[in-house]
Amino acid sequence: MKFLPLILLFILLNSCTIDTPDVELFCELDQNSTYIIKWDYAYAKEGFVEIYTSTDPENFSKKYPIGKYDIRRGFAEINMRKVNRPNFFLLSFNEKYDYKLGLQCSRFDSIQNYRDIGGYRSNNGKRVKWAKIYRSGTIANASSLDVERLKLIKPISVVDLRTVHDENYLDNRNLDVFCKAVSIPFDAKCGTPVNKIFDGKYRTGDAAIYMQDIQLGLVENGKKELRQIFDILLDESSYPVVFIDAHGMHQINFAIAMVLASLDIPVEVIQRDAMLSNKYLDKAKFKTILSQYSEYIQCVATTLLTVEERYLNSAFVLIRKKYGSIDNYLSVEIGLTKDEKEKLKDLLLD
């Protein structure tokens, strides 16, 4: 009988282990329309990973895998016949642990920086669901093929965060793709440097400070708008939701940061999401426009089209200094209740 407490303790400890071990996953589409799937599965170095596919990340059939690979291989190359439609994957390691995976950045002709925020791991081990929230630059210049690709994603809501300071902010072409279109001008109220740039009174250092001012301004001047954003996300009928601003960068970086923070996604992961704009914003498409201007203007413009970690970090520092924590800021200043946070997690975490 003296061993009974030890046995009970052993059972208790084993019952509290994480359902699925952490694993690093990555998916991209190469120029040959082949999906490159990579995994770093430290939990087991032997066995197999079976891969299944679906156009709906909520529904996978595990009847027939599209491939079976040695775990030690670490990657798979999968050619799908229809790359214009959304394809999601389920990776099953040794028929024991399952992980969903999607393409982070979708391929479009004229839409910049369009990507899914699915897959990010929260502090409690759950992951953001795929095909729920997308972030993007403006879709006003979308080609006809882009519009058809958007329709295949079956988005319900678009939240337009552009303000009067954004070029062509009134251009609402292609919003009819969505059932709901909501304009929430997410204005940091720090003006625009355009006139100073063309007058030669603005340098790259000034541009970097301006980028920080946007994030700082949104903390204080975007509270009402941020509450509106959360109200949309708390409505189950809103999904999938696409957030847009001029380039899918500055207003969106702060908005998505607060959404991910409400889901208990680590700050370093939130920063990594913001920095991805440097990868998925094609600056080469701006070269033709900028080539007609002086080298000085081109340098300033390049700074304005680049994300640095310090920009969003300045908002985090201000929030912690003034409100104690991001969680306090969301609850006290934005009015996000504990029950609302739990509902968001139910809606957006797997």
Image: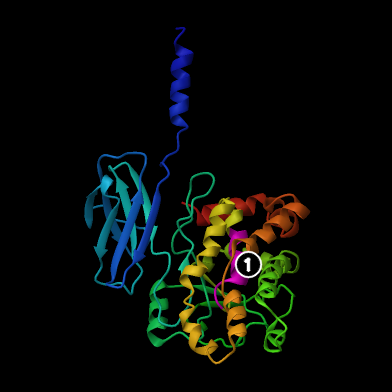
Q: Quadrant of residue 82?
A: bottom left
Residue 330 sits above or below residue 304 on the image: above
Residue 64 in the image, given as x and y percentages of width and height: 21, 55
Seen in the picture, residue 172 relative to 243 is either above or below; the reply is below
- Measured along the vertical axis of the image, is residue 134 above or below residue 335? below
Report whether 127 appears left or right of 218.
Answer: left
Magenta span dominant secondary structure: helix
Residue 346 seen from this side: yes
Q: Is residue 243 magenta?
A: no
Which residue shows up at 43% across the image and 28% down it? 14
- Residue at figure coordinates x 42%, y 39% from the top left: 19
- The secondary structure type at the circle numbered 1 is helix
Q: Which residue: 22% across, 51% down?
A: 68
Which segment is the magenta one? Answer: 247-259
In front: 78, or 240? 78
Where is residue 187? Give x, y as percent: 70, 75
- Toward the top, the furthest residue is 1
